[in-house]
Amino acid sequence: MSTQVSNEKPTLSGVRIRTRKRDAKAKAKYEPEAFRDSIFQLIENVDPTDDSKFTSVLDTAGNTLDYRRYGDSFFELFVTGGLIAPGGIINYDEEYGKFPFSLFVLASGDDPLAGAKRWGGLIVKLTRRYKYLERMFAESTEHILKHIHRYTEDENKMLAIGVGVLVTDAFLTLEPLKALQEDHLTKDGLALRFLTDMLRVFLMNNDINQLHKSLVRAKVGRLTEFFPPNKRDEDCFARHFEAEDMPVLIELHTATLTLARRNEFVDEVSSILRDAKEEDIDDDEEAEQIQATNLKVARAAKAAMRANKWEQHDTVSLAWDGIMNAVNWSYKSEQFEAQALVQIKRHSPVLEMLTTEPKSEISLLKHVQLYAYNEPRLTKYFGRIVLELYNTDVLSDSAIIFWATKGAKPEGKSGFLKQTEALVRKLEAMEDEDDSEDEE
């Protein structure tokens, strides 16, 4: 008797399959207008001057309203007073009008800064419980800033002040400002005007060093990128902030440019040396290649000195950094000394060319001291490095003696003096012998 195996799958009859809450939320219709209406209804009986009652109501409403899903709408409402439609147009509620606790309402009085500070306090309180809103606020701010060409001049000023307040309070970073670097925002000066108003607020309670750290941390780039494309030179930058009575920004810009040019030169030197190492050459051609490479670095150094009006003592330290950055350090610590000394010996002609003045020699030696102090791989080989620089005629005996007696920096001083003690004694003895011969 044959039997057939049924291919039918078992089923649960009479069992109701429940939809999980998170699945139901995902499938729910996205209705920002309905969310906006719910917010208005919650605060309908709240006095516009009662901030405590307002934050309490919205804090409790987080249990029923989906702040996570409607985060963008939530903050659009809080900033502009309405919802931002595609294209940047602000749509206000036909029944309720502008959101009474928004930045564009609170900062619209005679004292925009006071109103913006009040608004900033509300934002901080509301996000204190719902931490995910902090990240969402930063993202929403970037979205809102992309549409400043759709807002009025007064609204942009209020927005800049509000952002400045929150950045000052460390609630917001400067990262959202990158949204202003779009061509359609920079070409007519809108981005620059916004940046200027925002920085004015920030610098009321912060110094220029704090601003520099904030800009670097947010990877905003150079401030000139907020200028119209045809006005991104140093003269336009200086004239603008002189007219705005903000000279500290000119100082920061100058310092930033100087640092950038120094780093560019260091990278250029390292690149030249690395490219030369990658070339496949015979051993008998190596000496010629090293000589050609040193000549190329020397030309780059002279060009940088002319372009940036650097002196020898400025350039030699940068050349040292470039030379040492080109070393492909071994994983074995016992090879560090040999690698450093070989690199110095190969490229000493470059350093020698940049140390024809006593001031340049001392500057290099001090820099090498700091370099060895901050580079653990080389700290215990400082004495050998100095000896190599002496043997290759980069440093003179008088420069080393002066450094040891008067010029050494505090960083690692005692240890480095001990490492060079024998060399210094030998050089001093040689100097005394020369003095005796001259007397005879």
Image: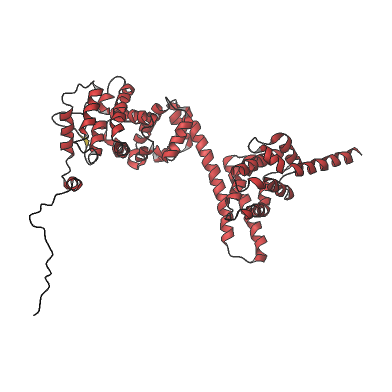
Residue 132 versus residue 250: which sits nearer the camera? 132
Count of number-bearing discs: 0
From the top left corner, tell me how far across and down residue 122 is, in percent: 29, 27
Residue 245 falls in image quadrant: top left
Which color scheme does this rendered protein use?
A: secondary structure
**Residue 238 in the figure: left or right of residue 191:** right
**Residue 79 in the figure: left or right of residue 295:** left
In the depicted structure, whether residue 48 falls above or below residue 93:
above
**Residue 15 in the figure: left or right of residue 119:** left
- Most extreme residue toward the top, as rendered? 110
Residue 229 falls in image quadrant: top left
Which quarter of the figure is the C terminus placed in?
top right
From the top left corner, tell me how far across and down residue 408 is, in percent: 68, 36
From the top left corner, tell me how far across and down residue 431 is, in percent: 82, 41
Residue 186 in view (yes/no): no
Residue 268 in view (yes/no): yes
In the depicted structure, whether residue 243 falls above or below residue 387:
above
Residue 316 falls in image quadrant: top right
- Most extreme residue toward the right, as rendered? 440
Residue 242 versus residue 359: which sits nearer the camera? 359
Residue 125 versus residue 346: which sits nearer the camera? 125
In the depicted structure, whether residue 334 falls above or below residue 228:
below
In the depicted structure, whether residue 375 falls above or below residue 40:
below
Which quarter of the figure is the N terminus placed in?
bottom left
- Most extreme residue toward the front, as rendered? 1
**x 63%, y 45%: residue:** 379
From the top left corner, tell me how far across and down residue 421 is, in percent: 74, 42
